Image (cartoon, rainbow, N blue to C red):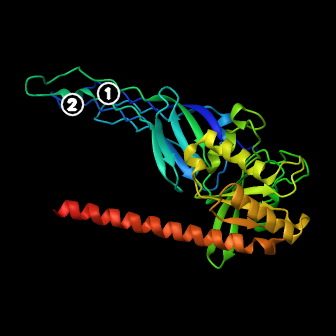
């Protein structure tokens, strides 16, 4: 299935059913009175996050989704049937925006999370609702209200723990294939990866994290050169970035130049993303001797004043990746523990405020 991470659609909730004018007419019941029933509520439209989906492709094919209208009321105080709601399943990580106002309506980050995007119409009332001691034969009813109609924009941001960034042919797809069950397209020419690829990396018993590989960035991506910044949204939710650098770049670019190019593109896309924890991973050490690799690592640290994590690996030699993956797993677990502790402390402060 083609990967689609943006889609526009129209949702139409069902109208409410109308109330009914009716009077009870039975033999031997001379003063039957009004018995017109209410209409039924119209169905609403919901988005539901589904972990089995990974693309918005279906919403490129069908663009209009309608919920059922509520039934009209009937005599003998019969209420109209409630309209059936419409549930649209989307991948986890989908954001829903109003196309008219650009307002964020919902951010679906958990499986089976549900967001109502169009409210069904309210039912109309039958004439039985309006009887009183002074109005014993009312002929008044109300119509159901129209269902909400909205123009929506869906945007998918994949949920992954670690994101791979780098220039084309830096070896990102090879690394992903080496450490996970993902099978991205791999070839010796640029832009073999045209869509994001996600894999699960197992580090030990009950220890794993998800890794997303993006199409390569090139200088000028901010202006739309190459594949542009289109797919960078998929690493906005990641907690850590692996910056993959080719030790022997096919176009002869220096290691420092490669790193600075990607840093500049990240900064142009989002300063917040550029400040995300990022580890430099020098790849293809199988093509360079150990002494030269050590010299390049030292150049990166001194020239860029790099204080962060720095690794030298070979994506075709999985054993050289063990330290990188183990450290990443430790970092993610530590970061998750810190977030839980901060959340617990926040809850305790909130409880203390309520008690005081």
In the rendered structure, find residue 129 and report the number of the disc placed on it.
2
- Using the image as rendered, state which of residue 141 and residue 78 is in the foreground: 141
Which residue is located at x 29 percent, y 32 percent?
37
Q: Which residue is mark 1?
A: 19
**Residue 320 spot, x, y in % from top left:** 79, 73
Q: Secondary structure at mark 1?
A: loop
Q: Splitting the image into 4 quarters, where does residue 296 fall?
A: bottom right
Mark 1 neighbour density, 10 Å: few (under 14) some (14–19) many (20 or more): many
- Position of 237 with respect to 261 (left or right) is left
Extreme-left residue of the structure? 133
Q: How far apart in space, not on screen, are marks 2 and 1 (Cα)?
A: 9 Å
- Position of 9 with respect to 179 (left or right) is left
Q: Earlier in the sequence, mark 2 or mark 1?
A: 1
**Residue 135 spot, x, y in % from top left:** 12, 22
Q: Splitting the image into 4 quarters, where does residue 220 fall?
A: top right
Rendered-image quadrant of the C terminus: bottom left
Extreme-bottom residue of the structure? 205
**Residue 182 spot, x, y in % from top left:** 77, 61
Extreme-top residue of the structure? 139
Taking the image as drawn, is residue 38 in sight? yes
Mark 2 neighbour density, 10 Å: few (under 14) some (14–19) many (20 or more): some
- Position of 278 with respect to 114 (left or right) is right
Which residue is located at x 55 percent, y 70 percent?
333
Which residue is located at x 90 percent, y 47 percent?
189
Image height of 178 relative to 110, above or below? below
- Mark 2 and 1 residues: CB-CB less than 8 Å, in contact? yes
Q: Secondary structure at mark 2?
A: helix
- Using the image as rendered, state which of residue 189 and residue 153 is in the foreground: 189
Please give the count of numbered marks on the rendered protein.
2
């Amino acid at each position: 299935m083609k990967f689609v991470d943006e889609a526009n659609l129209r949702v139409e909730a069902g109208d409410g059913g109308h109330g009914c004018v009716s009077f009870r007419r039975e033999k031997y019941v001379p003063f039957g009175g009004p018995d017109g029933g209410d209409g039924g509520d119209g169905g609403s439209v919901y988005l539901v996050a589904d972990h089995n989906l990974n693309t918005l492709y279906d919403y490129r094919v069908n663009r209009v989704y309608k919920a059922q209208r509520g039934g009209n009321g009937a005599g003998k105080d019969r209420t109209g049937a409630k309209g059936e709601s419409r549930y649209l399943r989307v991948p986890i990580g989908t954001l829903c925006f109003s196309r008219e106002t650009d307002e964020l309506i919902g951010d679906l980050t958990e499986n089976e999370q549900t967001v109502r995007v169009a409210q069904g119409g309210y039912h109309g009332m039958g004439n039985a609702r309006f009887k009183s001691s002074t109005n014993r034969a009312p002929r008044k009813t109300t119509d159901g209200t129209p269902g909400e109609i909205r123009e929506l924009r869906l945007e998918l941001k994949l949920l992954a723990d670690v994101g791979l960034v780098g220039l084309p042919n830096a070896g990102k797809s090879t690394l992903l294939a080496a450490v996970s069950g993902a099978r991205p397209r791999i070839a010796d020419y640029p832009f073999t990866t045209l869509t994001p690829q996600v894999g699960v990396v197992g580090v030990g018993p009950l220890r794993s994290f998800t890794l997303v590989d993006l199409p390569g960035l090139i200088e000028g991506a901010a202006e739309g050169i190459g594949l542009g910044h289109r797919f960078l949204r998929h690493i906005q939710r990641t907690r850590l970035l692996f910056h993959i650098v080719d030790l022997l770049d096919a176009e002869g670019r220096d290691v420092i130049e490669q790193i600075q190019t990607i840093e500049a593109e990240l900064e142009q896309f989002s300063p917040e993303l550029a400040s995300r924890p990022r580890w430099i991973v020098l790849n293809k050490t199988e093509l360079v001797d150990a002494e030269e690799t050590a010299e390049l690592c030292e150049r990166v640290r001194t020239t860029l004043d790099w204080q962060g994590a720095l690794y030298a690996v070979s994506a075709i030699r999985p054993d050289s990746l063990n330290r990188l993956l183990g450290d990443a797993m430790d970092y993610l677990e530590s970061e998750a523990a810190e977030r839980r502790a901060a959340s617990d402390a926040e809850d305790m402060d909130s409880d203390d405020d309520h008690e005081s």
